[in-house]
Image: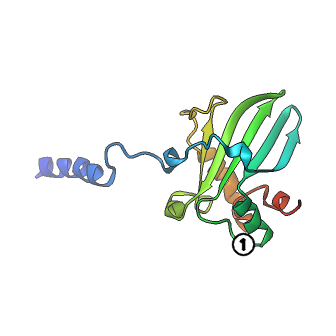
Amino acid sequence: MKFKNTLAVPAFLLAVCPAGAQPANQDIALDPDYREGVQYTTVERGNISEELYAAAETIAAARAGSAFPEGAVITMDDSRDGELHRILVMEKRAEWADLSDAGSWQFRVFSPDGSPDMNEDGARCQACHASRANDDYVFTRARMLSD
C-alpha cells in the first residue's frame, strides 16, 4: 500500500505540470518595428533614460479613459549612459489574467540585439506593476494623455 501512494504523488505532478510547460511571458515577441509606433514619453533618472512606445490604439484607449485593449503592447528602451542596455515589453492578453499579479499583463526583457534575456522571467516587473491597478497596471498611463 505504501508503495502505491508513493507513486501517486509523482503521477499527480506529471498530470498538472506538463513537461515542457513554459511561463506565459515566453509568448511575448519583440516587434522589430516597435519604434514606428507612438513614442509617447521619455523618463530620465540620472544616467538612465527610458523611451516608451505604444500603438496609436493603446494611446487612444488611455485618452478615452478605457482599459487598455486586448493585445496592447508597451515597449521601453532602457538606456544607460547613452547606450541601449535592454528592451522591456509588456503585453496584455485576457488569457493571462489568472497568471499575472498585474491584471492580464505579462512582461519580457530583451537584450539590445533583440534576443530574449533568459535570466529574466518578468516576475519583478509584475510585482512592481501590481501596485498600479488604478492605471490598468501601467506606470506611464498619465503620460499618454498629453500630445
Quarter of the image where the C terminus is located: bottom right
* Label tally: 1
Q: Which residue is mark 1?
A: 66
Q: Quadrant of residue 76?
A: top right
Nearer the observer, 60 or 95 = 60
| Residue 145 higher or lower than 53, as above or below | below
Q: Quadrant of residue 112?
A: top right
How is the model colour-coded?
Answer: rainbow
**34 lies left or right of 99:** right
**117 lies left or right of 81:** left
Residue drawn 49% across the image and 50% down it: 24
| Residue 47 higher or lower than 66, as above or below | above
**Residue extending furthest bottom?**
65
Q: Quadrant of residue 133?
A: bottom right
Residue 117 screen position, x and y as percent: 58, 33
Residue 110 screen position, x and y as percent: 62, 36
Residue 136 screen position, x and y as percent: 70, 64
Residue 42 screen position, x and y as percent: 85, 45
Residue drawn 14% across the image and 49% down it: 2
Nearer the observer, 131 or 68 = 68
Q: Amino acid at mark 1?
A: Ser
Nearer the observer, 10 or 24 = 24
| Residue 101 higher or lower than 114, as above or below | below
**20 lies left or right of 4:** right
Label 1 residue SS: loop
Residue drawn 60% across the image and 42% down it: 30
Residue drawn 58% across the image and 37% down it: 120
